Amino acid sequence: MRQRGLRVNIVNLKQRILSAARECFRAGGVDGVSMRRVAQRVGVSATAIYRYYRDKDELLEAVTEEGFARFEEYLRRAAGATPLERLRSIVLAYVDFAIDHPNHYDFIFVAARANTRQFPRDFDERRSVTFELVREQVAEGMECGQLAPDDAPEATLTIWATLHGFAALYLAGRFGTDDQRFRDLSCRAIERLLSGMAA
C-alpha cells in the first residue's frame, strides 16, 4: 500500500513539474523556462526535477508534445460535408491555435528544436498526426474530383507552408493586433491555392 502511495506521489510530482513548466513557457516562452524557475513554482529543489527530466531540453520536449496534442484537438474540430469544406474549417482552426497559443505555436513550428520531423521521410511514414489530418482531406479531394490529381503530400505541404508563413507574419506583429485581418488574409490565400489546385 505504501508503495502504491509512493507511485501516485511520483506521478503527481511529475505532472506538477510539467504544469509548472507549461506556466513558465506560456509566460515567457523558451527563455521563461529554467529548471530553477520551475522548481520554485513546484516547491522542490532543482535537483528533484532532474529525477524526472534529464535536462531543460527534455522538459521542453514534454511541453512540445502537449502543445502538439492541443493543436491536434483544434484541427479535429474541423467539420464539413466535403473535403474542401473540411480544409477550410482546418484553416480556421489552425489560425485560432496560433492566436490562442502564440508561445506554443512559436516553439513547435518556428524555433529550431531537436527531433523535429523531416519532410518527406517522417511525413511519408505518417509520423505527424496533424499533417496527416490535412493530407487526408487533400487526398480525398483528389479522389473525389474536387482537386486535380497531384502529389498529395507535396500539395499538403504547400497549404501548410502558406499557413505557417501567415502565422509567422502575425506573430511578428506584421498585422498589428488585428486577429481578424490575420484570419481573413490566411483564408483568402488558401482559397487562391485551392482554386489553382481545382480539378
Image (spheres, rainbow, N blue to C red):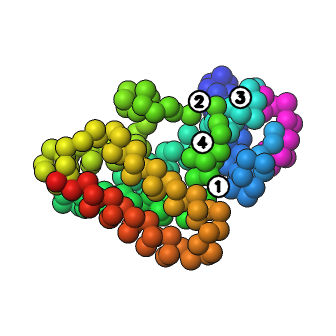
Going from N to C along the chain, the mark reached first, 2 or 3, is 3
Quadrant in which residue 64 is drawn: top right
- Provide the residue designation for mark 3: 52
Which residue lies most toward the left here? 144
Mark in the foreground, 3 or 1:
1
Residue depicted at x 63% and y 75%: 176
Percent x, y for residue 180?
Answer: 49, 76
Disc 4/disc 2 C-alpha distance (Å) = 11 Å
* Stretch in magenta: 36-50
Callouts 2 and 3 close, C-beta under 8 Å = no
User: Disc 2 designates what residue?
Assistant: 115
Disc 4 + disc 2, Cβ < 8 Å? no
For mark 2, does the 10 Å Cα neighbourhood hold few (<14), some (14 to 19), or many (20 or more) residues?
Answer: few
Residue at 68 percent across and 56 percent down: it is 26
Q: Which residue is mark 1?
A: 103
Is 85 colored magenta in this rendering?
no
Residue 61 versus residue 99 in the image, above or below:
above
